[in-house]
Amino acid sequence: MRENKDPFLRSSRLHQYIAERLLDHNKYLVVSPWGQRIGHISAEILSALCVSIRDKKKLVLIAPFKTVNHEIFKCRLNCSVYGEKNWKVRVLAYLLNFSLFFHYLYNGIRSNVVYCFPFLSKIIPSIFFYPMYGLEKGDYGERRVKGTNSYWDCNLYFSQNYQISLNDNQLNRGEITRKKMGIPEDSWFVCLHVREPGYTGPTNGDASISNYSEAIRYITQKGGYVIRMGDRTMTPLQTMEKVFDYALSGFKSELMDLYLVSQCRFFLGCNSGFSDLVKLFRKPTCLVNVYPMMYSTPFFFNYMYILKHAYSIKKKRFLTYKETLTTDDIVNNIYHPSEYLLIENTPEEILETVKEYILFLEDGKFKGSDEIQEEIRSVRKKHCEYMFDKGLAKDRLKVFKSVLQAQGRVANFYLEKYWENTQYLKKKNELYNSGT
């Protein structure tokens, strides 16, 4: 993909030029994250924070006027931050938001006109004009934050001791709301996020909240509270003691999204942009229902995860985890309905993962051998290199190469059952094929 085909890069040329004329790019890093998704805001702030620390630059964060979370731009960062009161920063903010206003105004009017008169859809073009600061063209033509090697740069994250925290005002307001929610100040809690199709439409990462009930009860039995995160389209949670359905409550706000994530004992989630917000705050993380593909491995060493199961329709059986790492289509995130089905983790598997992760948090040691974890990384890396050599991963090279250093750890019980073709897996195939 060439730069002139990337709409963000194409839209940002003039704005980037003006930013570098007003603020010396050798001393300042000006970044305006894409405001439409919390995952992109978090990923871009994380990259900008790490680059600013590494290169000893002053970071200028400019918030788009239409963003899913304004509070995140008020947080404390452990780098030199250049304030918005400077006239040059104000000029850049006005320029950016005036441009974005045109983008939303034009396309909003067009949408209403086309809705009333569909035949005009071919006459009135849709114009994508969404400029951003702090972008540059990366390898293979993808956009990235200036100074990074890729959009998700594992090595950069590992190399910098980045920190983000709420400011005093945010923390105080969050604590007041926490008390109103009924979560005692001396109690610990877990943030739970289960992706559903209501917000962005169906994805491979969607799952059923009902399968988490046993894991939720285990957490509450251990003394913790469970706070279900998400948007207002979520399926309501069944009423359970010490469980708060925050996503559907009147307490949901941009501030509380940040407060709860920053204060939780750990995050229980899946593939979603929300997990990038958690990554920004460096919270311990346990992921289930991760869909198998090359770049789905969680980044940090204290992350534990298990994957959804890939069922081969032709072979009439579940693939072993080892097979999922060496099946080209699955690695490329290509699931033909005639060839593969993705099956959610069972309530028992989710419960076992949570038990194993809480044990790690209590003891500071992971269960199982480190050798098998290294074997997983080795198999993944070798198959990546094979796909690169054969030209089978061209469209995803930019993502694959950036996450090969990911350090997330697969739950030990999951490996014992699914790494190779075990008796347990054979029994699971028999039950599934019989419709049980």
Image (tube, rainbow, N blue to C red):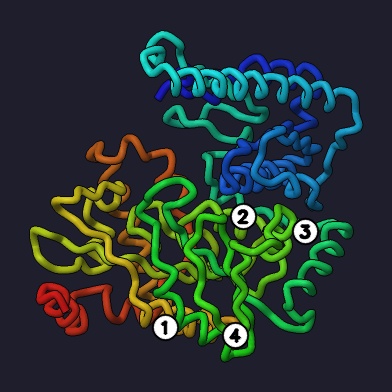
Q: Tell me the amino acid under the disc marked 2.
A: Leu
The label nearer to you, 4 versus 3, is: 4
Q: Residue at x 59, y 69 (%)?
A: 245
Location of mark 2 (residue): 277
Location of mark 4 (residue): 241
Answer with the quarter of the image where residue 177 lies.
bottom right
Q: Could you give the CA–CA distance between mark 1 and mark 2, rounded to whole angstroms? A: 25 Å
Give the side of residue 210 with respect to residue 177, left or right: left
Q: Could you give the CA–CA distance between mark 3 and mark 1, rounded to whole angstroms? A: 31 Å
The label nearer to you, 2 versus 4, is: 4
Q: Which mark is residue 352?
A: 1
Q: Which mark is residue 165?
A: 3
Q: Could you give the CA–CA distance between mark 2 and mark 4, rounded to whole angstroms? A: 27 Å
Label 2 CA crowd tier, 10 Å (few <14, some 14–19, many 20+):
many
Give the side of residue 324 with respect to residue 154, left or right: left
Answer with the quarter of the image where residue 101 lies.
top right
Q: Tell me the amino acid under the disc marked 4.
A: Glu
Secondary structure type for disc 1 = helix
Mark 1 or mark 4: whose residue is earlier in sequence: 4
Q: Quarter of the image for the C terminus: give it.
A: bottom left
